[in-house]
Amino acid sequence: MNELSKYLQTHDMEELHPSQIANLLKDMDESSFEKAILLVPNELIADVALELPDRYFGDIVESYTPKELAESLSDLESDDQTDFMQELEEIDEKVAQEVFDHLDEDDQADILQLKQYDEDEAGAYMQTEVYMAGLEQNVHDVIRDFADLRKQGELENVQYLFVVD
């Protein structure tokens, strides 16, 4: 637990990596894990839960309220939100419904859209956040739009840019 505390204290919020936090957590015994999970910033808890092996998921869910889980979940991209909700439904459908009810309508719609695909369909692995640029836009316009969307919390990262006419 000391390593996790040190990591959290020596890094700014935007420098914290959920995968690093998960690596530190999974090396702990059960008692230490239960205490340490409460040190994780709430906005990262859903992301950390997805980074951990499945056997830890229930412990994380029990450590936070549905509202806290929903607030953390709202920071994830739609595909990760859907993965989190599906895993939560397998553990506790009642809590999953409470978490879902705390999400905003856009997040709920994205999750419902992605859940309609079977696991063996490509749609099950897509996300709804897509950036499209018009043919009339130059590189400077696109970069400015990226920066604005990022500041607004609408866009976390971009893997692909689609140019449309």
Image (cartoon, rainbow, N blue to C red):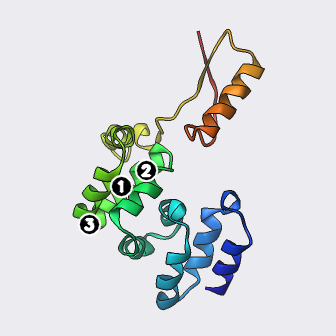
Front residue of this view, candidates 118 and 88: 88
* Earlier residue among tags 3 and 2: 2
Measure the C-alpha gap from mark 3 to mark 1.
10 Å
Q: Is there CB contact under 8 Å for labels 2 and 1?
A: yes
The residue at the point 58 percent across, 71 percent down is 22
Q: Please give left or right for residue 160 compared with residue 94 in the image.
A: right
Rendered image quadrant of residue 109 = top left
Front residue of this view, candidates 35 and 54: 35
Q: Secondary structure beneath disc 1?
A: helix
Residue occupied by mark 2: 81
Tell me: residue 21, above or below residue 89: below
Q: Secondary structure beneath disc 3?
A: loop
Q: Amino acid at mark 1?
A: Met
Q: Amino acid at mark 3?
A: Asp
Residue occupied by mark 1: 85
Q: Please give left or right for residue 58 compared with residue 15 in the image.
A: left
Tell me: residue 28, above or below residue 112: below
Image location of residue 20, percent across then percent down: 65, 68
Tell me: residue 141, above or below residue 114: above
The residue at the point 61 percent across, 85 percent down is 1
Q: Is residue 158 visible?
A: no
Residue occupied by mark 3: 92
Image location of residue 47, percent across then percent down: 52, 59
The residue at the point 64 percent across, 27 percent down is 161
Image location of residue 130, percent across then percent down: 54, 31
Measure the C-alpha gap from mark 2 to mark 1.
6 Å
